[in-house]
Image (tube, rainbow, N blue to C red):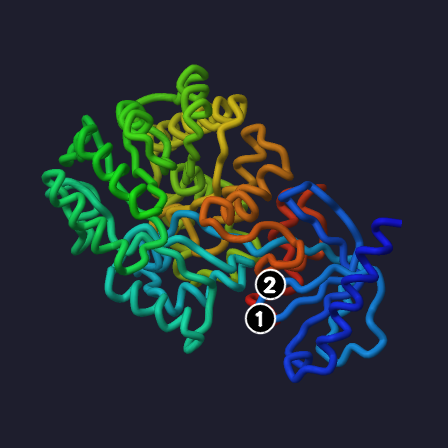
């Protein structure tokens, strides 16, 4: 009875829309199965939405509905995917000229892979700022861009070798830069810790100061880590998330428990660290989606690199891959929240496609399919303080799949259509 009342009230709510001009801009997806990672529900219903968000879930089609209808019988609907760590530089491969993109091109390309939003964690600050401003003003489209705008690192530290960035040498500079980024509405703050590495690192004291300053502005912090010591520093600083896995060892079961106890989110970028090997020595790049989003020369570059790799190099790459997988297994066992981030723009990644590879690797390491799907949808949106799931009020950015990713996570690549901000893309 309760469900009937809810359906009736939603119907009455929708009926009011049919008399408004905006009704013509509404989209009704009919007869699909709605997979909501936020509550792990799987329900066959109709879904009504427009550019403002999801309006209603319906058991019957309103007889006077005048908007656009799309019958998706036999299909599955999931929230749009969000890549929580990317760079819009483009695609790179050994033995190949890079496929250069930038914010505008990358935002269009990743949509084809079902990625309706991404977090750029370092690039050209002004270019990112202007593209995001134009996008949020409704003047240009493409996947939603969230960004740290810059990378806060030690003078001469990581990020500075790739271009202009912001550096922190003392507490005053930390406060100044974070204040300026807050004024530009940075979606997150990226900090760099590379203790024991080749490049200078923010000290644990400066990392803590920066994290506290970001918290004053209500901005969440993500720390690029390189070593196990960096993880200790991040925990002590009270940051919100770390990205990458340590190069100098495995995250132990005890360390994973500490991360969980401190509610630290981890964005492992496992695909970036392991897929270069698999791009060369498996059939991964034969995927129709990979071939859709990347230039042929990029795919061929990996094939050529494979033919030139020595047996010793192959073994080293294999051992490195196994080390990263063990860290993920320990994080999964400790119930640490994992978010899907690809570090796209680097070798071993393809814009948009690598999001699906990251989910696949999570599942291979022991994460359940629902959890893997949440890592790139509801959990990602929760981190960004955005509405989650497929309920009324959530973002109208969705992916329609031919087959269920709950049955097989690789089905996330079987894309029938993408909806972004209420607009049917393909």
User: Is residue 135 shown above or below 179?
Assistant: below
Which residue lies at the image location 38% right of the left edge and 69% below the top edge?
104
Residue 325 lies, in percent from the top left, at 47, 28
Question: Upstream in the sequence, badge 2 or badge 1?
Answer: 1
Q: Is residue 97 left or right of residue 398?
A: left
Q: Residues within 10 Å of mark 2 (few under 14, many from 20)?
A: many
Tell me if 206 is positioned left or right of 225 in this view. left
**What residue did someone put label 2 on?**
396
Residue at x 20%, y 42% (from the top left corner): 158
Q: How many marks?
A: 2
Q: Is residue 249 above or below residue 37?
A: above
Element on which disc 2 rests: loop
Q: Which residue is mark 1?
A: 51
Cβ atoms at labels 2 and 1 below 8 Å apart: yes
Is residue 151 something that shows in the picture? yes
251 to the left or right of 339: left
**In which quadrant of the rendered view does residue 149 lie?**
bottom left
Position in image of residue 276 (x %, y %): 40, 42
Q: Is residue 208 left or right of residue 311?
A: left
> Relative to 324, is 176 above or below?
below
- Who's the residue at 58% across and 70% down the image? 51
């Amino acid at each position: 009875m309760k469900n009937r009342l809810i359906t009736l009230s939603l119907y009455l709510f929708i009926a009011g829309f049919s008399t408004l001009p905006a009704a013509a801009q509404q989209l009704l997806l009919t007869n699909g199965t709605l997979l909501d990672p936020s509550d792990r529900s799987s329900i066959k219903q109709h879904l009504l939405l427009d550019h403002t968000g999801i309006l209603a879930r319906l058991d019957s089609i309103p007889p006077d509905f005048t908007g656009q209808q799309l019958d998706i019988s036999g299909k599955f609907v999931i929230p749009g995917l969000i890549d929580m760590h990317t760079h819009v530089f483009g695609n790179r491969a050994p033995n190949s000229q890079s496929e250069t993109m930038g914010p505008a091109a990358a935002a269009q390309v990743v949509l084809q892979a079902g990625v309706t939003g991404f977090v750029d964690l370092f690039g050209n600050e002004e270019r990112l700022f202007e593209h995001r401003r134009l996008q949020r003003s409704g003047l240009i489209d493409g996947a939603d861009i969230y960004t740290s705008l810059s990378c806060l690192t030690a003078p001469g530290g990581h990020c500075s070798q790739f271009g202009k960035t912001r550096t922190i040498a003392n507490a005053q500079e930390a406060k100044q830069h974070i204040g300026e980024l807050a004024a530009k509405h940075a979606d997150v703050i990226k900090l760099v810790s590379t203790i024991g590495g080749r490049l200078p690192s923010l000290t644990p004291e400066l990392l803590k100061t920066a994290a506290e300053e970001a918290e004053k502005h209500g901005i969440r912090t993500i720390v690029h880590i390189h070593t196990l010591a960096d993880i200790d520093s991040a925990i002590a600083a009270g940051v919100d998330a770390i990205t990458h896995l340590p190069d100098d060892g495995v995250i132990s079961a005890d360390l994973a428990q500490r991360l969980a106890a401190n509610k630290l989110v981890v964005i492992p970028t496992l695909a970036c660290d392991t897929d270069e090997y698999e791009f060369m020595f498996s059939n991964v790049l034969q995927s129709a989606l990979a071939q859709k989003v990347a230039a042929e020369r990029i795919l061929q570059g990996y094939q050529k690199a494979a033919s030139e790799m020595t047996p010793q190099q192959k073994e080293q790459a294999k051992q490195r891959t196994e080390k990263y997988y063990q860290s993920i297994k320990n994080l999964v066992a400790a119930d640490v929240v994992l978010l899907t981030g690809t570090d796209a723009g680097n070798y071993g990644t393809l814009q948009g496609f690598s999001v699906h590879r990251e989910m696949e690797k999570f599942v291979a390491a022991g994460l359940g399919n629902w959890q893997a799907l949440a890592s790139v949808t509801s959990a990602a949106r929760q981190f960004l303080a955005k509405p989650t799931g497929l309920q009324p009020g959530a973002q109208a950015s969705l992916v329609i799949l031919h087959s269920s990713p709950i049955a097989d996570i690789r089905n996330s690549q079987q894309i029938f259509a993408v909806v972004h901000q209420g607009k049917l893309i393909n």
